Structure formats: structure tokens, C-alpha cells
Image (cartoon, rainbow, N blue to C red):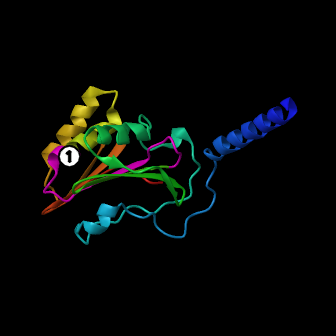
Amino acid sequence: MKKKTGALTGILGTLIICLLCGLNRTFASKPETELPTSPAATAASLPTDTAPAPAVEAATATKSASAIPSILPVDVTGNLEEKGFTCSEVEEQQGYYVRDCEKNRMFVTVYGREVLSVDFIDAITLEGNGADFLAFIATIPFVENSELQQQARSWVEENSGSKETSTTINGVYFLLQSQSDTARLQIGELK
């Protein structure tokens, strides 16, 4: 009986190691289509001259390659869940790990090339210019630096209602877009 238990333990251990190794794989081929946008992107009627979410290109999944290197997905989803958002489980889509969060008419989608990285955050509100909501989202990449959080918050508040504007704060790219009752903040880049 001990031999069977030992063999089963060995097999289970090997399976767990294989699963964990699979989380750090390299994506070698370019997807044939663009990465799907968040559910809100379809509902939101942003200007037609606004570019869609960038297409996904081939990438090697490494933590150092993350567009927003200072945070983990749980920093985004955890902060949103504390504010009453419902977040989905992680799903793999075209070489990215994707998490969707929503509350009322506010939507956030988090993309990462690795299961524990954040490369891109796409936040959309269908409730006016959404300055408070988007200003809060802008602070998330800097969870450990209150000065940078304030800089990001201030930039969104000052530019709220602008048709389209962008900036880079501490190496992180921000794009803010607004139209009547819809506003969108994109943070980071899909490479």
C-alpha cells in the first residue's frame, strides 16, 4: 500500500510541476486577429476616429517585459472588488491573461502576458465623464508611491472631458478619451 501511495504522490507532484511550468511559456506565433475588447467597448460609442485596442503581437512572457511592472493583477482586481466591482476569473485569450471587472455601467479589463503580470488596463464608464472613477483607476499602477498616485489622479481630473489626450508617468503610458456620456482610460501598452 505504501508503494502505491508513494507512486501516486510522485505522479501528482509531476502534474503540479507541469502545470506550473505551463504558466511561464513563450508565445511564439502572432495571433491572426486582434485581442477582443472588453464588453463595455462594444457598448461604448467612442468617436469613430478613435483607434481600437492595439493588436496583440508576438511576445515572450517575462515579468521584466511587463508594461506596468510595479503591480500584480490582484492590485487591480482587489482594489476594484473593495469598491463593489465583480471580477471574473482569469481567462487566456490570444496569448494574454485577461480579467474583466464591472459595476453598474463601469468596466475594467486587465491584460497580462503572464498570469501574474499587468501589461494593459482598459477602463470604460458609460456614466458621464467618469472623472472620479477614472482618476481612481489611474492611481492603481503606483500602489506603492503616493506621489505618483497623486500625479496620475491630477492628470485625469485636469483632462477629464478632453476628446483625447495622453501622457507618460514614470514610464507608464496613459490615454484618456471622452465623448458625451462615455469616457475611457487606457494604461500601459499591448506589445
> Looking at the image, which residue is at 29% across and 62% down?
40
User: Left or right: where does residue 162 sit relative to residue 170?
Assistant: left
- The residue closer to the viewer here, 190 or 76, is 76
Element marked by disc 1: helix
- Residue 51 location, x and y as percent? 32, 66
Q: Which amino acid type is marked by label 1? A: Phe
Please tell me how many numbered marks the rendered image carries: 1
- In magenta, the rendered stretch is 113-134
| 191 up-or-down from 44: above or below | above
Give the percent coordinates (x, y) of residue 177. 22, 57
Where's the N terminus, which quadrant?
top right
Instruction: Decide if residue 131 is on the left or right side of residue 174.
Output: left
Pick out the residue farthest to the bottom: 48
Crowding at label 1, few (<14), some or many (≥20) Cα neighbours within 10 Å?
Answer: some
Q: Residue furthest front?
A: 1
Q: Indicate the position of residue 171 as horizontal and vertical percent values.
A: 37, 39
Whether residue 169 is visible: no
Q: Is residue 122 magenta?
A: yes
Q: Residue at x 41, y 38 (%)?
A: 74
Residue occupying the point 15% across, 44% down: 157
- To which residue does mark 1 refer? 133
Q: Nearer the viewer, residue 16 or 141?
A: 16
Which residue lies at the image location 56% right of the left edge and 53% below the top edge? Answer: 59
Q: Is residue 185 left or right of residue 118?
A: left
Q: Is residue 78 visible?
A: yes
Q: Position of residue 23 (x, y in %)?
A: 61, 45
Q: Residue 184 colored magenta?
A: no
